[in-house]
Image: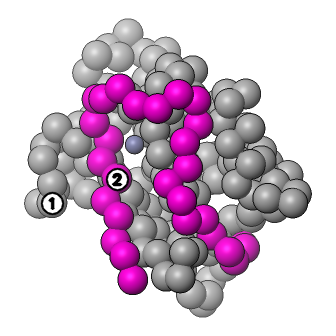
């Protein structure tokens, strides 16, 4: 078993989409969100966009009583890593497949709003939809992209998948992938 920590930091990264290696072999992925309504809404939208881009080859669902594979947690106290890190994803890999993933959102040191880029005080409020799209990309097995239109850009502002993100999800999970 291997644990990977993916931190959101400013860096220059590889060209276009980049996979981390392992991917999920099972679908649907049962996910659970712990946090305010705006986070639940952002996660529901993000997983729907990624799922649609995969041609439903990878599916997400919220099934009560099922074993949860993906958690997204809003952390307001005792943020466990450096305060400059806005969010991170940890996943567990077993025999080359991702078997669980946990996303943490830093609500202790950052203030989040949905579609913050449309708000005058965008420098104060960070874009929750963009960060959630980005972290779900990590959950699915993607690394960073240096394309600023990609949701996998290290400091993401995009809330919709770019053509390159679409190519990435098709590569990893599309028919015959
Ligand atoms: Zn990242």
Q: Position of residue 32 (x, y in %)?
A: 51, 70
Between the C-alphas of marks 1 and 2, the distance is 13 Å
In-image side of 97 versus 79 (left or right): right
Quadrant of the image occupied by residue 90: bottom left
Q: Count residues near mark 2 (Cα–Cα under 10 Å), then give few for <14, some for 14-19, many for 20+.
A: some
Q: Secondary structure at mark 1?
A: loop
Q: Quadrant of ligand 1?
A: top left
- The answer to whether mark 2 is within 8 Å of ligand 1 is yes
Q: Look at 12% across and 47% down and name the residue there.
A: 82
Q: Earlier in the sequence, mark 1 or mark 2?
A: 2
In this view, the residue in front, 167 or 133, is: 167
- Residue 159 visible? The answer is no
Q: Residue at x 49, y 15 (%)?
A: 118
Asked whether mark 1 lies closer than 8 Å to ligand 1, one says no
Marks 1/2 in contact by CB < 8 Å: the verdict is no
Residue of label 1 = 80
- Dominant secondary-structure state across the stretch colored magenta: loop
- Mark 1: few/some/many CA within 10 Å (<14, 14-19, 20+): few
Q: Is residue 86 left or right of residue 144?
A: left
151, 108: nearer the viewer = 151
Q: Which residue is mark 2?
A: 6
Q: Quadrant of the N terminus?
A: bottom left
- Secondary structure, mark 2, is strand
Residue 56 located left or right of residue 77: right
Q: Magenta stretch: give its range.
A: 1-28
């Amino acid at each position: 078993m291997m644990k990977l920590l993916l931190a959101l930091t400013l860096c220059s990264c590889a060209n276009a989409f980049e996979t981390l290696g392992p991917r999920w072999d099972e679908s649907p992925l049962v996910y659970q969100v712990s946090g305010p309504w705006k986070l639940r809404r952002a996660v529901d939208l993000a997983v729907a966009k990624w799922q649609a881009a995969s041609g439903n080859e990878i599916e997400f669902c919220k099934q009560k009583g099922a074993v949860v594979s993906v958690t997204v947690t809003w952390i307001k106290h005792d943020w466990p890593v450096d305060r400059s890190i806005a969010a991170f994803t940890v996943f567990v890999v077993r025999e080359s497949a991702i078997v669980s993933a946990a996303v943490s959102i830093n609500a202790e040191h950052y203030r989040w709003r949905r579609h913050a880029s449309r708000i005058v005080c965008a420098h104060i409020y960070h874009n929750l939809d963009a960060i959630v799209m980005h972290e779900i990309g990590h959950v699915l097995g993607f690394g960073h992209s240096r394309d600023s239109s990609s949701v996998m850009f290290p400091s993401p502002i995009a809330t919709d998948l770019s053509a390159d993100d679409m190519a990435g999800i098709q590569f990893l999970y599309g028919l015959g992938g």
